[in-house]
Amino acid sequence: MNRIIRIIALLALIIINSLNNVFADGFSTPNDGSTYSFATLATIDASGVSIIEKDGQECYLMTISDTISANDVFLMDPQAVVLMADGVQLVILGKADFNVENVVFEPKATDAQPYGIFVGNEQEKTFFRNCTFNQVGLRNMSSTGLILDSVKFNHHNGMIGQAALVLGANGASFEITNCTFAHCAKSAIAGAANYQNPIVIDHCEFLYNGQDNRNMPQLNLTTADSVVIRNCTLLGDSTKTKVGGITVSNLVGFTNDMNTLIENNTIKDHRYGIATYCHQSAFIRNNTLIGNCHEENPMNGGSGINVYDPYGTQYTYIEGNHIERSLWGITLVGGGEANLGRTDVDTSSANYNPGRNIFIDNGNSGQLYDLYNNSKNTVYAQGNTWNVAEQTEELIEEVISHKHDDPSLGEVIFMPATEPTGIKNLRKTTESEVIYDLQGRPYSSAETNSLRPGIYIKNNQKIIIR
């Protein structure tokens, strides 16, 4: 662990020195309290900003890097298109406001590789709204953080760091809502392993990021006092077999309160769905995880949900998730306490968990694996619906790996199981009625034999097609 910390500290120093070298070149405002925009920068020859026409539209062209100094202010021009030359960045060290309409940042030419925007505003959070970043990125360097709403990142080129949005400085907090990240080279959002960044990510779309096919997920976050990911859609590119969905990790031994909430997300077609690593309290609720099976070697991953904690300090609460077509449904590797369902206690108890997890067709090498307890802990997993014809103890044993299969493993207490009200096997129905998938697309009952396994809606009730 000490070696990991030394390596991370060295990497952080290298990054800081590299950034200092980058920011040393270019134009800087005089730091006298003045206010700037691209329109005003275009009147200053030394800024390298000019106005040109592209496709019949006036655009601002940046040919060198510009820095807005700490005592100066930057106000983004509304409805502006900013073209950035190769290696160019806009550095914001003072107050700034990007809460404008229809702003686009993109390369000057198809072969240009600009960085994008670096934010080091230490006075307050910087607000971005209705901005589009095409092939360029956004990196926070401040201890205050960023607010992003309705911001789009498309085809990020990977120049600014390990993600289209890099969280940066330790302690900075973030609010990210209604944003879209699509076809980015690396992760969509990422932070350093040795930085704690409280963050809320709500109602965002993450579409086919990780195009470089590196061993990194679309969301690559470090634990903090509050990490919240909810109401998001993550769609993976099934040809990118190294890219996961969501990882929230604690790899440098943070020991204070770490709270992670991952709920109401749809996560499809990744190497794995959700992974939580080491010390934290992780609550994973009401997510739909389908087809997160694109790991080529099942021994290296492919879980719908994976808990990895060799130090035995993580508390994990897992409830109401739909887990389908993973190589492994849920895998527990170590961990302190994992609660996948406690219906044997009073509903007022802190340990109560109704379960309600649904498992469909998870497995590999001809074997079904809904839950693999690869720890020595006793795990409660009551109240769930397992991938068996009938919810009997004998049949459920076939899809759970635990002490019953290997005396060195902990026991899973999974009875009673549940057949949730309103869920049945649609293959057995013959009524001529309309059914809907979770995207609201209608089908007739006559089409059920050709539908993929999953959850559908009929008469306002959830129905499983197996």
Image (tube, grey):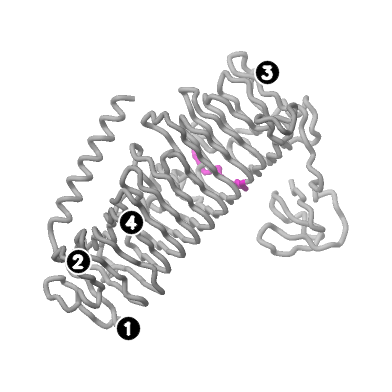
Within-10-Å neighbours for mark 2: few <14, some 14–19, many 20+: few
Q: Give how far across and how far down residue 37 sits, in percent.
A: 26, 73
| In this rendering, the label closer to the viewer, 3 or 2 | 2
| In this rendering, the label closer to the viewer, 2 or 1 | 2
Of marks 4 and 3, which one's residue comes earlier in the chain? 4
| In this rendering, the label closer to the viewer, 3 or 1 | 1
Of marks 1 and 4, which one's residue comes earlier in the chain? 1
| Label annotation for residue 404 | 3
Question: Does residue 81 show up magenta in the picture?
Answer: no
Q: Which residue is mark 1?
A: 57
Compared across the picture, whether 233 is left or right of 249 comes to: right
Question: Does residue 293 show up magenta in the picture?
Answer: yes
Instruction: Give SS at disc 2.
Output: loop
Of marks 2 and 1, which one's residue comes earlier in the chain? 2
Instruction: Name the quadrant containing residue 64.
Output: bottom left
The kind of residue tagged 3 is: His
Q: Nearer the viewer, residue 135 or 26?
A: 26
The kind of residue tagged 1 is: Gln
Q: Nearer the viewer, residue 163 or 209?
A: 163
The reply to whether dot 3 and dot 2 touch (C-beta < 8 Å) is no
| In this rendering, the label closer to the viewer, 1 or 4 | 4
- The residue furthest top is 407
* Quarter placement of the N terminus: top left
Q: Give how far across and how far down residue 156 sits, in percent.
A: 36, 59
* Residues in magenta, as a range: 287-296
Q: Indicate whether 284 appears above or below 40.
A: above
Q: Give how far across and how far down residue 20 sits, in percent.
A: 17, 50
Of marks 3 and 2, which one's residue comes earlier in the chain? 2
Of marks 3 and 1, which one's residue comes earlier in the chain? 1
Q: Which residue is mark 4?
A: 124
